[in-house]
Image (tube, rainbow, N blue to C red):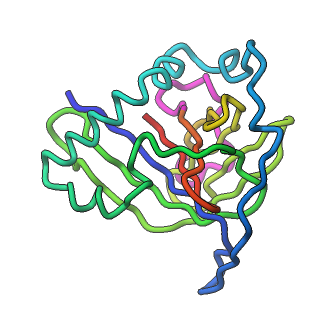
Amino acid sequence: MGRTIWVLAVALGVTLGACRSVVPPVPPSSADTPPDATGTWRATATDADKERIRGWYSSWQAALADARAKGFGADIDREGVLLQPMTALPNPHLPAGDYRCRTIKVGAQGRSGLSYVGYGWFRCRVSSEQGLSSLTKISGSQRPVGLIFPDNLKRQIFLGTLELGDEKMAVNYGSDRMRDMAGLVERIGDNRWRLVLP
């Protein structure tokens, strides 16, 4: 049985029309200090999501191998650093604001299904919430929404849920394991981040 990862590419910029704003690199922040040993994300995450985060690298490698074996190697290579697992840079903090985002699915569960799908750009937003940052996909029929917790110098942890269709409010994290989402938020360039959902 294969593994699937979802990679959400996040690029800072104005999303209206053809306008684009170029912003200087984000300076180091307090998010870069090592977290307290009690780590708030560990206190919040379900056991299944802790395991998912622990196994992120093997899931990613299996998903890439599956996609390459099914003829998607050129698509993977075209994405460059976005789909390379060990390319996280220091200072993963996502500043509050509106972003252009897109989703790429790599790998397939079982024998059926596509092993690579790249979706178009959509709008997402990072806000301050409950003393943390929140990430929300604003448009589309499947909209991840959740909190971003500090973890270490090169990553933060996203814990959230999936809002579907015309729903106006997401279900609470931990109340529906089929909708729970857990992943790594990493900076991969100037004004570029990714959310990896193994």
Q: Is residue 184 above or below residue 139?
A: above
Label count reads 0
Residue that appears at 67% across and 50% down: 168
List the single residue furthest toward the bottom. Answer: 18
Reply yes or no: does residue 179 show up in magenta: yes
Residue that appears at 81% across and 44% down: 29
List the single residue furthest toward the right. Answer: 131
Span shown in magenta:
164-182
Residue that appears at 85% across and 35% down: 130
Q: Position of residue 176 (x, y in %)?
A: 55, 26
**On the picture, is 85 further left or further right than 101?**
left
- Quadrant of image for the N terminus: top left
Q: Is 188 or 94 nearer to us in this picture?
A: 188
Q: Is 148 or 109 nearer to us in this picture?
A: 148
Reply yes or no: does residue 59 show up in magenta: no
Q: Is 114 or 59 nearer to us in this picture?
A: 59
Q: Is 12 or 44 nearer to us in this picture?
A: 12
- Magenta highlight: main SS: loop
Q: Position of residue 144 (x, y in %)?
A: 57, 46
- Quadrant of image for the C terminus: top left
**On the picture, is 14 further left or further right than 7?**
right
Q: Position of residue 49 (x, y in %)?
A: 52, 22
Q: Which quadrant of the view contains residue 139?
A: bottom right
Q: Position of residue 98 (x, y in %)?
A: 71, 64
Residue that appears at 34% across and 30% down: 59
**On the picture, is 38 further left or further right than 87?**
right
Q: Which quadrant of the view contains residue 195?
A: top right
Q: Is residue 88 above or below residue 97?
A: above
